[in-house]
Image (cartoon, helix red, strand yellow):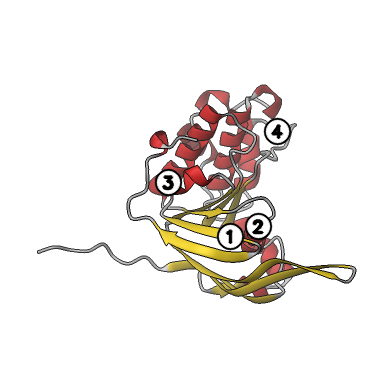
Amino acid sequence: MSTTAPARTHLIEFRDVSKTYTMGEIAIHAVDHASFSIDEGELTIILGASGAGKTTILNLLGGMDTVTSGEILVGGENIATANERKLTDYRRAKVGFVFQFYNLITNLTALENVEFAAETCPDHLDAREILNVVGLADRLGNFPSQLSGGEQQRVAIARAVAKNPLLLLCDEPTGALDYATSKAVLQLLADVNEQYGKTVVIITHNTAIGTMADKVIRVRSGMIEDVSVNPDPTPVESIEW
């Protein structure tokens, strides 16, 4: 008798979301009536060219910007109607951020950077353990200036994961890295998704890496062009670009 895997539940729902910026008399529709869902535990890639609106989507999902209209449900809560205090709590406890340029605190060591972020969250993970997982057990006492770009990005990922957030948001996480280091960082994000069951969302313009994802959301001119589910993601080591 065959069995089927239990259905995942939606962690994120964008419901007819729009974000419009006004410059004088010109209205710029950065996000235009976007609707999609991301399931708990999915690795999702939001794909689009520069200016397509994908980073605005990330900023809205991360509680760093507010919608013009629509709803954004995260774990059943509509963050689109949250006040600034609630958004601050949401960003601190429920979202781990990984940016293109690391954003580490320069006068703190790798361990201190991770501890500083983790200890603001009630259910945080052990900083040393996470740095060991990302392959930096021998670099705990190094400052960012003593680390390579790839190592700094690993610290940034460890910092985000150690918060034990609901989701991990990654904005062009390989944009400042060379090819080999980029693949190592993508593998690390895939491992975090698999080993910790974290919902991982990666924003990128690199179409080649879409095949590693459970779901790909393509954005064009602020609109959702296509949403595709990949039942058999490609291993990172097999991806070329």
Residue 15 location, quadrant: bottom right
| Identity, as a three-letter code, of the amino acid under mark 4 | Leu
Q: CA distance from mark 2 to mark 3?
A: 21 Å
Q: Is residue 123 left or right of residue 22?
A: left
Which element is circle 2 on? loop
Instruction: Judge depth for marks 2 and 3 and give the one in front.
Output: 2
Which element is circle 3 on? helix
Tell me what residue is drawn at x 63 percent, y 59 percent.
62
**Image: 10 above or below 157:** below
Whichever of callouts 2 and 3 sits on the residue coming sooner in the sequence is 2
Q: Is residue 157 left or right of residue 211?
A: right
Tell me what residue is drawn at x 74 percent, y 68 percent.
84
Task: Give the residue at mark 3.
Answer: 212
Q: Quarter of the image for the N terminus: give it.
A: bottom left
Q: Residues within 10 Å of mark 2 (few under 14, many from 20)?
A: many
Task: Give the residue at mark 4.
Answer: 108
Residue 73 location, quadrant: bottom right
Residue 12 is situated, as x and y percent measured from the top left of the image, at 51, 66
Labels 2 and 1 touching (C-beta < 8 A): yes
Q: Residues within 10 Å of mark 4 (few under 14, many from 20)?
A: some
Labels 4 and 3 touching (C-beta < 8 A): no
Task: Give the residue at mark 2.
Answer: 52
Q: Is residue 75 visible?
A: yes
Circle number at residue 219: 1
Residue 119 is situated, as x and y percent measured from the top left of the image, at 61, 48
Q: CA distance from mark 4 to mark 2?
A: 36 Å
Q: Residues within 10 Å of mark 3 (few under 14, many from 20)?
A: many
Instruction: Judge depth for marks 4 and 3 and give the one in front.
Output: 3
